[in-house]
Image (cartoon, rainbow, N blue to C red):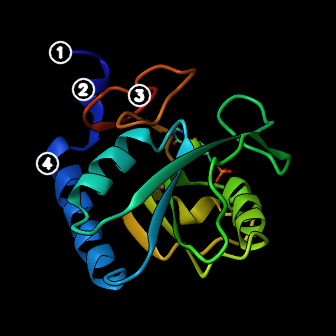
Amino acid sequence: MTDESKKILFSTETLRETVQRLARQITEDYRGKDLLMVGVLKGSFVFLADLARAVDLPCEVDFLAASSYGSGTASSGNVTITHDLSVPLKDRDVLVVEDIVDSGHTLAYLMKVFASRSPRSLRLCTLLDKPSRREAEVHPDYVGLEVGNQFIVGYGLDYDEKYRNLPYISVLGD
Ligand code: IMP
Ligand code: MG
């Protein structure tokens, strides 16, 4: 047993049920549409892999990487795209898939950039939401689980690039 497993916030089973619930809703909402899932690297890679397999529809997947210059565990308003998408968004039904919305700076910026590329529709699905930390206006269309003001790791989320491969989510620290 690792140290992190002692402070489990969301178990593998809770995450599985949450992904299934989101996937059922997305399957209903996107039936007959041209679904393109856009994952924000790196944090979303585990969630997106599970979500895409649970959605019962044909869909395409693409990724982009963004970074926001801030210190330690906080992000800032200075967001840049470090690796852009490989497909145009024009006339696509785009579902952005994110691990967590915290201050909202990253997604506020990215949603603006994506909207400027003329998708047919644009929605945001986040596994985790920290609404109490919001500084920029972001309104996810699909939210898995809410989190308080805690720094968490696992299931794609890192601290200093570690813990992304934990199959559950735990609270870092103490
Ligand atoms: P925001 O721009 O403040 O909304 O932060 C977005 C990014 O910060 C997320 O996509 C994560 O990569 C990272 N982040 C925010 N909160 C956490 C956390 O509790 N654990 C790990 N990463 C986090
Ligand atoms: Mg992220």
The residue type indicated by label 4 comes to: Glu
Q: Quadrant of the N terminus?
A: top left
Name the residue at 48% across, 77% down: 141
Give neighbour class at mark 2: few <14, some 14-19, many 20+ (Cα, 10 Å).
Answer: some
**How far from the left and from the top, in percent, is residue 61?**
45, 52
Badge 1 amino acid: Met
Q: Label 4: which residue?
A: 13
Give the residue displayed 24% in from the left and 51% down from the top.
15
Kindly report the distance in space between the C-alpha atoms of the residues bearing marks 2 and 1: 6 Å
Residue at the disc numbered 2: 5
Measure the alpha-carbon separation of dots 2 and 4.
Answer: 14 Å
| Rendered residue at 33%/45% (across/down) | 49
Say whether disc 3 or disc 4 marks the residue closer to the N-terminus: 4
Q: Ligand 1 within 8 A of label 2's CB?
A: no
Residue topped by disc 1: 1
Position of 143 compared to 28: left or right?
right
Residues packed near mark 3 inside 10 Å, few (<14), some (14 to 19) or many (20 plus): many
Q: Amino acid at mark 2?
A: Ser
* Disc 2 + disc 1, Cβ < 8 Å: yes
- Counting from the top left corner in percent of width and height, residue 50 is at 27, 48
Mark 2 touches mark 4? (CB < 8 Å): no
User: Residue 48's x, y, as percent?
Assistant: 38, 49
Q: Check residue 164 in the rendering and tell me which mark sits there, or answer none.
A: 3
